[in-house]
Amino acid sequence: MLMKRIGIILIMAVMCPFIQAQDSKELKEAFLDGEYFLAYEDFLDALPYYLKVYEQNTNNANINYRIGLCYLNIPGEKNKAIPYLEKAILNTTSDYKEGNFKEERAPHDAFFFLANAYQIQYKFVEAKKNYNKYLQFLEPSDTVNTNFVKQGIASCQNAKEIVKHPVYFDLLNLGNRINSASKEFAAVISGDGSTLVYVSSLKFYDALFYSKKVNGQWGLPVNITPDIKSDGDLYPTGLSYDGTQLLLTRNDRFNSDIYSSKIVDGKWIPHEKLGKNINTKFWESHASLSNDGNIMYFTSNRSGGFGGLDIYKTGKNEETGLWGNPINLGPVINSQFNEETPFICADNKTLFFSSQGHKTMGGFDIFSSEIQDDGNWSEPANIGYPINSTDDDLFFIPRNGGINGYISFSDKEPLIGREDIFYLEIFSDKNPRPVEIKGLVSLGDKPSEQTGEIRIWLGNDQSGSSQVFNVNAPEGKYSTITKVPGKYKMLFESQGFVAENRFITVPPNYSLGEIVINVNLKSVTITEPIVLKNIYFNYNSYKISKNEQNKINFVSDLLNKNLDLIIEIAGYTDSKGRTSYNKTLSLNRARSVADYFIQQGVDKNRVKVKGYGETNFIAINKNKDSSDSPEGRKYNRRVEFLVISGAKESIVTEKVDLPADLIYKK
């Protein structure tokens, strides 16, 4: 038995190095596969290979760094980058060995990408902290990267301000005929709005699809990738006004140039490279056309620019059809960083483009600028949050001067796939949002049984404008549209019902599309006035007797139901006793009633106490023969209630019905 155990131990001792070597070989292969896909920016394909290596060593800073990079470049997954990059920065080096399986440290760049990940998640304090940390690793002579990181820090502050003033817009998803469960992006639309070309990420390649709009609906898309002879590396950037000429860019990771394809005899022909005035040995990444097709706007990082990629424009020679020498749009448009995806509006004056410079929230933001009367461009304006975000925002194709536009989103609802193409309507002073004010007006306690005409008056406090419209009960539905922000008053009235007012505000930031006001008008009822009966007291007493309890409870309940009702409690006496004594006695009678109300929950400030002594007699104190009249005096020993303010209903003081021989005559 002992020999058998020794044999097993010896076998395991021999096998363990072999198993470990086998595992190490598989992990190295997984790492190198991840590196291969990462080199081609196929982050989604690279990720599972790095995760496999990560399972064997979760503290490997290099693998955490690689996983963080992958997540940071996968739409909808970017928040997952943070915990991996947080582990990566725990072990960084300036002597980083890229592509080396044995490298377990991360480069200092991990701080930059962690800052970027934080910024995308709107965690600006953490982002700025890591941007500043990364600055410490840059050489003083590295002004390009230093300025880029400082722009990241500035954009964090920009974002904090921009998100305080969001723009409001309506989104229309182009639907499941265009959008699929995958990614659809880089949509270009012809100027006449009838032609759409876009990219759809299929299983093995990015395909170009073409659709025509018929009767207001996009037709079944056609895959034109084979027609234009694309290997899945051509992307649309612009369409002519009539949709017959398509501009494309090819990015082979070593160079990027502009190409063109046309429809000939109803079919797209193979792409052709544009001439040397457009394409150079440098990077040309995007091109689009004016509506008349005679001006092209494109981006290039050729020498002589103001930053990285700059926007240029060039005109077409009418005789030769060739594009002329390009003109840089200048430093107002082009920053020291990258500008991308320029599109000119139909007016040939308003340009929309994306930039890493100017007042960006982070990454690329979409901006607009107009040519002024003096020929200069206006200062680019950020089109606002949440169209722009702290991530890269590109490829906004304006319509109607930028009131509308096409763009792809991966984080807006309703989504069909991982990224969809949307049509926007942006609300602003140029395009005020129509606000529907609507609701239901009903009559009485049984609305379904009440009929009658209802008059609705709507007035704007600022402009003084008003409108009147009528609806009929029992339906009672009303609706009206306004585009004017401000405060409004509404009056609802109908014959035989109590009119009601409502006050609404149409916000100046166009954040609301509808305001719903439902009203039920109460019937007008004729009722007897509420009588506050006097409280009577025994001789020389201010104690409330049991006989008066019901009356005092009635007044107490009335006060608790009408919280704005304020009353005076007036105490009186008969003529017996000294005047000064009776003054005090009358005040005590009033106070005893007030104390009772306060005990029942009535605010003491709503009951005012007065003692009037032997005044304001309502009955005789003596008979005609000067003898005492106990029957008369009992009516004078009383407390009366007087309404000071807040009466919602008719409330009166009791008029005591006395026998004729007891009535006091002044």
Image: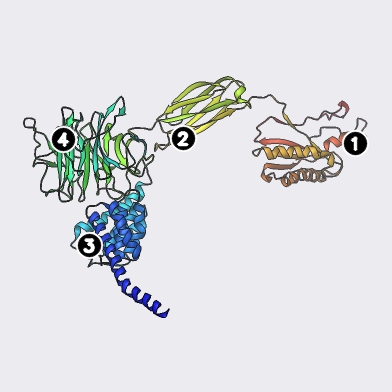
Q: Nearer the viewer, mark 1 or mark 4?
A: 4
Residue 599: image x %, image y %?
73, 47
Q: In which quarter of the image is residue 324?
A: top left
Residue 647: image x %, image y %?
66, 33
Mark 4 neighbour class, 10 Å CA radius: few under 14, some 14 to 19, many 20 or more: many
**Is tag 2's residue or tag 3's residue first in the polypeptide sequence?**
3
Left or right: where does residue 324 sit relative to residue 30?
left
Which residue was labeled with disc 2?
505
Q: Helix or strand or loop: what does disc 3 sit on?
A: loop
State the separation of the CA atoms marked 4 and 3. Answer: 39 Å
Q: Which amino acid does label 1 sit on?
A: Pro
Left or right: where does residue 189 sit relative to residue 556?
left
**Is tag 1's residue or tag 3's residue first in the polypeptide sequence?**
3
Q: Which of marks 1 and 3 is in front?
A: 3
State the separation of the CA atoms marked 2 and 4. Answer: 53 Å
Which residue was labeled with disc 1?
630
Which residue was labeled with disc 4?
261
**Is tag 4's residue or tag 3's residue first in the polypeptide sequence?**
3
Q: Helix or strand or loop: what does disc 4 sit on?
A: strand
